[in-house]
Image (cartoon, rainbow, N blue to C red):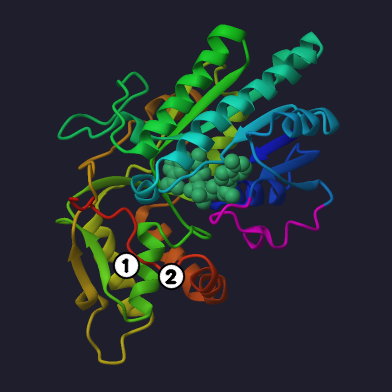
Amino acid sequence: MNLLVTGGCGFIGSNFIRQLLTTKESPLRKLVNLDRLTYAGNPSNLTGIAGDTRYVFAHGDISDSALVVSLLRTHQIGAIVHLAAESHVDRSIDSPEPFIQTNVVGTLHLLDAAGHFWRELEEAAQRQFRFLHISTDEVYGDIGAGPPATEQSPFAPNSPYAASKAAGDHLVRSYNKTYGLPTLTLNCSNNFGPFQFPEKLIPLVILNALENKPIPVYGDGQQVRDWIYVEDHVRAIGMVLARGQVGGTYNVGGGNETTNLDVVQRICALLDAKVPRPDGKSYSAQIAFVADRPGHDRRYVINCSKLQRELGWAPKESFETGLAKTVDWYLDNRAWCDEITAKKYARERLGKPPTLP
Ligand code: NAD
């Protein structure tokens, strides 16, 4: 199998590539990583992998159909795992357009290029080809007090990010139904773990705590998310790619329904035990409630019984063990964090509520 991964220098993509290339029984012959290296793309997320002879890096945009077709032909790709995206809700509030450009138009161009190449293949290779699109549980919108979202739940995206991902999901589905392209979609809940860009809640809290800065909690902090350790997610990606039902969608989540405030307090407790503050107080003294995110959904929780039943997937990491590993990783990798803080993002507030004219 030769694989094209898009967005492989990002958080989930780099964890996926690392897991694939370090698994002994991996059937992989070649892995091509197409990444535009936006602010979120970081080649040092893949340090240690770059020397693997199966690994090829291609710097480019998923919207560049000519480049994508040429990569597919040159490397005789058998499957695409599409992770490239603009991924941060707050940035989509400040500036929706790049989200439409990459998550909608980019996904469309990638599908077109894949379809073009796929039609050139022999029948047997066409049957084996896969286009796996990685999406989010945010497409289902705020589920309130209702049951966890299933694959049949209606889409109701509420942020420009979620709307752009929902549009991408619909395009992927349409390329299967209309053109027969063998597509699959995985809708995942909130990931956490090593190499996550510090704009996202968990690394932001860890780093602000350690630097004695306010730890911002949006609104009342009672928004509920279902957290999944990134290694459990990337294992699900491998399983759906290998054995998922073509044309289908699969939900994946860690089964860890937690409020944002609870996540923050757990991180503070872990840091209190690992690196106590010099004044002996808890890091939770740094918690600062700030204006809520506009349109902030109260609750996302996902039902992933289809993935468990059909493919035998189950998370290996509990929220407690995954969070402890994550805190340790950020403590051990301060140089990685410092470089981002110095060059890309100094952890300023993004996605501010719009001010009146
Ligand atoms: P990320 O922001 O960390 O990484 C995105 C990567 O895509 C970066 O390497 C970036 O350089 C690359 N990229 C962006 N635009 C590109 C373009 N036009 N062409 C080529 N490369 C481009 O994102 P992530 O958190 O790793 O998320 C990966 C995927 O998983 C996204 O599709 C996201 O919507 C989805 N997802 C993420 C989560 C989560 O909690 N992080 C949850 C569910 C689904």
> Residue 25, image x and y in percent?
73, 42
Label 2 vs 1, first from the N-terminus = 1
Instruction: Tell whether 182 sits left or right of 85.
Output: right
Q: Magenta region's main secondary structure?
A: loop
At a point 39% along the width and 39% down the height, the residue shown is 161
> Residue 168, image x and y in percent?
48, 27
What amino acid is found at the position of numbered circle 1 in the picture?
A: Ile
Residue tagged 2? 346
Residue 281 picture quarter: bottom left
Instruction: Tell whether 340 sits left or right of 318.
Output: right
42 magenta-colored: yes
Residue tagged 1? 267
The quarter of the rendered structure image containing the N terminus is: top right
Label 1 residue SS: helix
> Residue 323, image x and y in percent?
39, 61
At a point 17% along the width and 64% down the height, the residue shown is 289
Q: Estimate how packed mark 1 is, as few (under 14), some (14 to 19) or many (20 or more) residues with alpha carbons within 10 Å.
A: many
Q: Residue furthest bottom?
A: 279
| One can see residue 35 in this view | yes
Magenta stretch in the rendered image? 37-52
Q: Is mark 2 within 8 Å of ligand 1?
A: no
**Is 22 or 71 nearer to us in this picture?**
71
